[in-house]
Image (tube, helix red, strand yellow):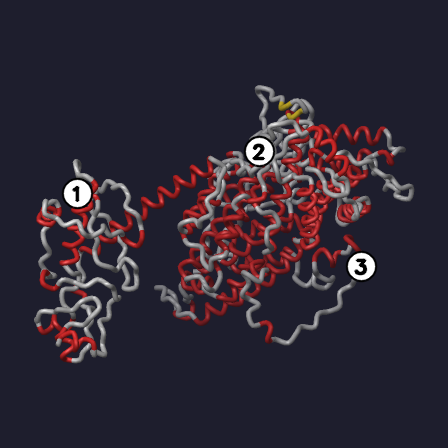
Amino acid sequence: MTMAASSHNPFPRSPNPSNRSYDSSSVSSATSPRPQVQLLGNLMSSNARTTTQTPQPIGIPPLPPAPQSGFQPYTPVTATSVMGRDSLPPTESVASTPGLSSAQLSANVSAQKRAYRQRRKDPSCDACRERKVKCDATETTSCSECSSRNVKCQFTKETNRRMSSIKQVQDLEKQIERVRRENSNLRRTLAERGEHMDVDTEGAEQSTQQIIPDLNSEPKRRRRPAPLLQDPSRARTVFRNFSKGVLKPPAPYRQPQSTIVTPEHTRPPLPPKATVDKLLHTYYGATHIMMPILHWPTLQHQVEELYQNITDLQHVPISWHSMFFAVLAIGSLFSNDPYPDRTLRASEFLDASRGLVDPWTNDFDLDNVRTSLLLSLALNELNLKSASWTWLGTAVRMAQDLDLHLEVVGVRSRVEADMRRRVWWAIYILDRTLAMELGRPFMIDDADCDVALPEPFDDHFLHTEGPMHPPNAIPLTHFLHGIINIVRSFSAMRKAFSSSVIEPPRLATFDNHFLVCQKMFPEACEANNASFIAPHMLMPLAYLLSARLFLHRHNLAPGCPLEARSDAIQQCKVTAIDTANLIVRTNATLADTATALLVTHIFRSTLFLLFTGCYDLAATCLRALKSIDVRRDVAIPCGRYLSCFLQILGAKQRELLTILPRSTTPGYPPQAALPDPRAVQDALLKDEELLIYVSSDMQASIETAWVWIGAEREAPLTMPPSSAGGGLAHLDLRTGLNAKEREDWGGWDSLLELTKGLASGTASPTPGYAPRAQTLPPIKVEQGASMPGSGASEIGSSRNSPTAGSASGSRSTERISIANII
């Protein structure tokens, strides 16, 4: 009768159905659980039955026990969680008992399972519990009481939850942790064998830690063919002869191609030797210390030979000749020549280098790759980032054609082998940096590369037979290795950017990595160091500082929680403060040494300093940008953007001062009181329009931008006609602004006045950053004189003393203008 009634019950039992059924005859009270000693005694009794197989939670195999240290905190389980099943017994008490055979162990565990099954988690349904009658419900059928009353048989009372579910969660967490440890050990074993286990990483935090390579760690070697048992020299000879036109052998085994010089291909004239020496000096100080893609002693020797036979240029390899003009172009961009002479001369050298590039060539050498890379670098400094991106793609394809992305054997000399590595890693750095700035995909996949890191020796200690390192000399003075360690984390950052919000554990992983990377730079570069630094030290540090800003700026998006956005603003503010303090500590002007990367980073830092009320340090950054001015084409557009932001920020601040409730100050009339400055600043930090402006170039990528949402419904804008032609010398092309737009923002002095107005003029003047005489690191001589940047005191022949009090003036980093007004 009960079963018949239950079959017609319109309200089946609500918990998850199962094939199991409870034994109602042995249900114990929910409020009086059986003592643990009695339970263990029953488990270890000799009459335990062995007909039931040991249950394992959610498919996890039995694992060896782990030592316990008391009660561990747990995470509450939701109703829909897979852990919300019946409590399972702890395996440690049984599996760790000595002297038990496998049959006895199975019998004991089966008895333990039965005991827990008899102690049903929910002894009575809600209706029977309220009426205080016996409930005979099973997991698949309703109880007779609910069936007769035609009500829903459900188990939702909070008092029905038992402490056994807590123990179940703990057991499952321990077993999951053991499985993870075993998987990690298995992956490590397979990695040592050179094999790969194609499984997903467990957890976002662990995957992030695994993706970021350790400092100075070599890339994973790709698989190579196994050696043959017999010598294939005869087949190699035949293959090399008859495979022509069918395929190219790997780069180290290709036959040198004969250079065909056409009579009509004239070479551009060479500049005077004195000019070349000066431009090589500036190139060394601005580019070579970060990307030493040229063996400097060899280059100096080749230049001397070139000017000894200046009348016979047709015998100079055309690829080297093109590379030479690209070097001079970058040297011109960083020279101290007046504007616009430097840009015009750089444009001429770039045109000469491009004119010597054969777009139809099918055979490349290392100088071809260097030329494309240097052209990409120069175009990036000229603010032609899309053109730079295109030439970089050419450099990547040429390098891959020469197998620079692979560690190869058979290279003739140690110098050539290391130059191959340096050129590849320089391309890798530019690929990662431009992709992060422009929001473009990476062109290089880490999984395709296994080339080793360059040798940690300076050019003047690296010779054909190997490095010659004097005992008292510094082995490495360039920053290539430090920059490589920074940009190798960009792949993990890009993966983290695929999430709408980066969680704090992942942020901490990247921050720790950047902290370790910073220790690779000289001690003077640390934030808590008060000593002065050379201006060229900021160029490699810009990679680290901009990476930190990119990381935390991601959480400014509207989809992030308010706490995440607030923390992102504060972390970006910290990075901006570090940047401003480094600028204060420079002992020379940034005018002729600042790269486009450093200029754009100072621009982003200025936005966050103004946004968060650090007006003194913002003025320091503005003075640095003022000293750079037209020397970098990106500086003028940055100044115009900052002018707009300052005006909008000032207008919103004045509006808040009128609408927010005024604080009452004793001794002052009510109309003279001002709102609480903290309330004003908090309101500014939550302004969505200001957050769009602060995010700046985040809005350049369709994957990260939110300002363009809904723009498709607007009428298309009518843009003024742009003047075509002019080449690289055309200023409109390089700045993206016409003549009127380059003048309408008022100049750097107006920005400083606007910043002073935001601070209300009551703050004490900060010495900050004052332009000084140009200082470039000296070119290294053959004897291996130490370079600045390695902690050496010599900076050049024109060191100037810093302005008095400039270091101390940067310490006030948290002033709020409205507080100063009050």
Residue in the picture at 64% in, 76% down: 715
Can you say which quadrant of the picture contains the C terminus? bottom left
Query: Can you identify the residue that label 1 sits on?
Result: 104
Dot 3: what SS? loop
* Callout 2 crowding tier (Cα within 10 Å): few <14, some 14–19, many ≥20: few
Closer to the camera in the image, 545 or 29: 29
- The image shows residue 711, relative to residue 735, as above or below, that is below
Front residue of 306/390: it is 390
Q: Which residue was labeled with disc 2?
A: 226
Mark 2: which amino acid? Ala
How dense is the environment of label 1, judged by Cα within 10 Å: few (below 14), some, or many (20 and up)? some
Residue 107 rendering spot, x and y as whole percentages:
17, 47
Mark 2 and mark 1: Cα distance apart in space: 51 Å
**Which label number is shown at residue 529?**
none
- Total labels drawn: 3
Residue matched to label 3: 725
Residue beneath the point at 14% across and 79% down: 148
Where residue 310 appears, x then y in whole percent?
87, 33
Q: Position of residue 282 (x, y in %)?
A: 71, 38
Q: Nearer the viewer, residue 332 or 556?
A: 556
The answer to whether 125 is drawn above or below residue 497 in the figure is below
- Between marks 1 and 3, how big is the CA–CA gap? 90 Å
Choose mark 1 or mark 3, whichever is in front: 1
Of the numbered discs 2 and 3, the one sitting upstream in the chain is: 2
